[in-house]
């Protein structure tokens, strides 16, 4: 940059490209006027502008006239004093002698300093390129920096606070743009490839092998154990530091953009405040008003910047996704034309079967709800804990009976004890039916004790007899009778549950809570899922319409679990409840009868036919008839076993318990 020359002010900025192009277009549009050429005019003006004290022989002309469309200058020798700087742009109507450019007057400062003013010094065109901040933030008809586009050369200069705030804002904007460019150039995250994945897998395998060996050695050496623990702690700290460092490096460009946006917002708000303070000086007097105005402007800029950023990002994402999807779709169609045709045909087929799809959706939702309803509403620790707690109660009872003679002081003992046992799925199904919304071990502790007290009934009876020894002396002889009755845990639900709870209990027993893996040794595993034996009733037996109707109702529930006391499809059935339900559905009105009641309802016969009932005794410890079923002919029956299904009466078990056949009225 050349130093300032005497008699001239600082150079004015060159015209903005937009102004030069406008002027050029205007000059091309207007017809050329006839007059002297610009070179001759420049020489004449320079000759007239020479100071009287300068030597004519030492001067050479210099063109100082800015012609629209041409910004070149003719160099002046360094020993020639240059004229003062030009002011606003000349009139573009022409450059002739009669209608030439206007000239500025001598200022007071120049008059006081004694500087001479050229007689016909042309004014150079003043132009200023709008900065990005000026283009973005001016809010009125003025130009950049708060100056109006129509300012004359004699307007007041830009105040120092306003100029500093503008420069600060432009500096902050430059840094913000650089930060955004750096963030945009940041490479996206690339997931590890197969080589890196394989290397990581190998490293982890080696790491596990080495630590496994160290674990074996540290059991025998305390020093090795301490060093190993320290090494593990160091590894954990190292992994944390590496992960934190990578995260910081990855997020640094985004954080830099955030800081730059915040600083630029503050600088822009301060610049707008300085502009407003220049127009309204009273704003500088009230500090509270000044702070509040800055705060509002800052919020306004933040909202504008955020909205612009979100809009740009959304547009970019949409364009990227659309382009990617379009390219992928086009490539797929080119690679698989036959598959696309098949897919279109399938789509048409699906549209035609819309009603069927709706039905399948409803069915799928129902199936999903059924699966959820048949699952135990408790987690594994609660399920296993409840079983363990109940087993502990049984173990305590068994230990009490085993050590009974050692802990009591009687002369004689008599024991009548049932076995101590239960099935874990029966226990968990009862607890889940009682607590539909879910349960924990703490929630069912009282239920476990209550169930245990109802299942096992321990009776201790002591009889004291007076006896005489061989010498004729009398003495007391104490006899203790100990009786333990196991009421069977599966028989309790009917006494402690309502119909809704019984229904849930039957559902849990049929599905085992969808957890057959918890107790694989249970006798209930696969009992309800494994298909049972089927039996085809002879067609001649189905000629009897009454028997055919009874068989149709009875076969609906094949595979249902046996539930003690159940008498409806919602709760499932026991043997007598099963037959009572069939009879009520086929024209009889027997209500709810037990096995003995059904036997009394029928007439005993010795030549059974399909549709008669068959009765048994002694299938469990109860007086009278203990079991019943529907006779199908050929030595087969359909009964509520566990599960409900067919049975052959010619087996040893059923023949040993067979009591009688009965015919319905």
Image (tube, rainbow, N blue to C red):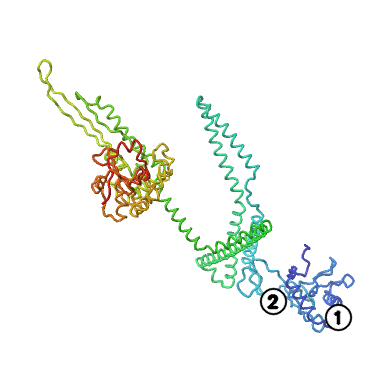
Query: Residue 401: x, y in percent?
Result: 27, 29
Q: Are marks 1 and 2 in contact (CB under 8 Å)?
A: no
As drawn, the residue found furthest toward the right would be 57
Categorize mark 1 by other alpha carbons within 10 Å: few (<14), some (14-19), many (20+). few
Q: Secondary structure at mark 2?
A: loop
Left or right position of 125 against 369: right
Which residue is more in the foreground, 546 or 408? Answer: 546
As drawn, the residue found furthest toward the bottom would be 98
Which residue is more in the foreground, 307 or 541? Answer: 541
Q: Which mark is residue 28?
A: none
**Observer able to see residue 434:** no
Which residue is more in the foreground, 566 or 94? Answer: 566
Q: Secondary structure at mark 1?
A: loop
Q: Is residue 615 above or below residue 215?
A: below
Residue 61, quarter of picture? bottom right
Q: Can you identify the residue that label 1 sits on?
A: 36
How far is disc 1 from disc 2 in space, using C-alphas? 28 Å
**Residue at x 24% of width, y 31% of height:** 416
Residue 182, quarter of picture? bottom right
**Residue at x 60% of width, y 69% of height:** 275
Query: Residue 276: x, y in percent?
Result: 58, 70
Q: Can you identify the residue that label 2 sits on?
A: 152
Categorize mark 2 by other alpha carbons within 10 Å: few (<14), some (14-19), many (20+). few
Residue 89, quarter of picture? bottom right
Left or right position of 403 against 208: left
Query: Residue 54: x, y in percent?
Result: 85, 72
């Amino acid at each position: 940059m050349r130093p300032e020359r005497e008699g001239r002010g600082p150079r004015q900025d060159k015209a903005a490209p937009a102004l030069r192009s406008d002027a050029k277009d205007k000059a091309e549009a207007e017809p050329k006027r006839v007059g002297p050429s610009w070179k001759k005019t420049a020489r004449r003006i320079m000759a007239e502008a020479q100071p009287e004290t300068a030597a004519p022989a030492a001067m050479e002309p210099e063109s100082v006239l800015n012609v629209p469309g041409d910004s070149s200058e003719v160099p002046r020798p360094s020993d020639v004093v240059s004229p003062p700087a030009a002011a606003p742009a000349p009139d573009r109507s022409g450059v002739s002698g009669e209608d030439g450019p206007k000239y500025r007057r001598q200022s007071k400062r120049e008059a006081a300093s004694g500087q001479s003013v050229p007689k016909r010094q042309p004014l150079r065109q003043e132009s200023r390129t709008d900065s990005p901040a000026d283009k973005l933030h001016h809010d009125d008809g003025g130009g950049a920096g708060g100056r109006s586009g129509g300012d004359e050369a004699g307007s007041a200069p830009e105040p120092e606070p306003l100029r500093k705030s503008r420069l600060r804002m432009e500096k902050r904007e430059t840094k913000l743009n650089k930060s955004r460019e750096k963030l945009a150039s940041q490479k996206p995250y690339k997931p590890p490839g197969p080589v890196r994945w394989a290397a990581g897998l190998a490293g982890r395998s080696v790491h596990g092998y080495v630590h496994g060996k160290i674990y074996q050695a540290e059991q025998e050496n305390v020093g090795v154990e301490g060093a190993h623990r320290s090494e593990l702690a160091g590894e954990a700290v190292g992994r944390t530091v590496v992960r934190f460092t990578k995260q910081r490096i990855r997020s640094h460009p985004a954080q830099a953009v955030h800081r730059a946006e915040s600083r630029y917002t503050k600088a822009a708000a301060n610049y707008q405040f300085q502009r407003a303070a220049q127009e309204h000086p009273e704003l500088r007097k009230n500090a509270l008003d000044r702070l509040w105005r800055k705060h509002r402007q800052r919020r306004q800029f933040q909202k504008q910047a955020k909205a612009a950023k979100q809009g740009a990002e959304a547009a970019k994402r949409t364009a990227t996704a659309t382009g990617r999807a379009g390219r992928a779709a086009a490539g797929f169609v080119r690679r698989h034309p036959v598959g696309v045709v098949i897919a279109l045909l399938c789509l048409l087929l699906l549209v035609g079967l819309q009603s069927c799809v709706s039905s399948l959706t409803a069915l799928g939702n129902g199936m999903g709800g059924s699966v959820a309803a048949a699952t135990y509403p408790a987690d594994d620790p609660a399920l296993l804990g409840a079983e363990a707690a109940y087993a502990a109660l049984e173990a305590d009872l068994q230990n009490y009976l085993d050590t009974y003679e050692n802990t009591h002081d009687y002369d004689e003992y008599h024991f009548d004890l049932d076995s101590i046992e239960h099935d874990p799925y029966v226990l968990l199904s009862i607890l889940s039916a009682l607590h539909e919304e879910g349960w924990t071990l703490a929630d069912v502790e009282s239920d476990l004790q209550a169930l245990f007290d109802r299942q096992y009934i321990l009776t201790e009876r002591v009889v004291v007899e007076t006896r005489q020894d061989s010498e004729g002396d009398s003495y007391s002889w104490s006899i203790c009778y100990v009786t333990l009755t196991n009421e069977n845990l599966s028989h309790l639900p009917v006494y402690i549950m309502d119909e809704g709870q019984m229904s849930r209990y039957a559902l849990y027993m049929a599905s085992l809570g969808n957890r057959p893996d918890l107790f694989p040794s249970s006798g209930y595993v696969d009992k309800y899922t494994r298909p049972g034996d089927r039996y085809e009733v002879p067609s001649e037996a189905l000629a009897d319409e009454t028997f055919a109707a009874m068989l149709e109702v009875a076969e609906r529930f094949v595979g249902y679990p046996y539930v003690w006391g159940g008498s409806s499809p919602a709760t499932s059935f026991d043997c007598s409840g099963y037959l009572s339900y069939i009879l009520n559905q086929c024209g009889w009105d027997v209500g709810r009868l037990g096995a003995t009641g059904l036997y009394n309802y029928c007439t005993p016969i010795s030549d059974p036919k399909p549709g008669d009932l068959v009765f048994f005794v002694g299938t469990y410890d109860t007086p009278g008839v203990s079991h019943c079923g529907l006779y199908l002919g050929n030595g087969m029956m359909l009964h509520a076993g566990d599960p409900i299904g067919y049975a052959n009466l010619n087996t040893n078990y059923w023949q040993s318990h067979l009591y009688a056949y009965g015919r319905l009225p």
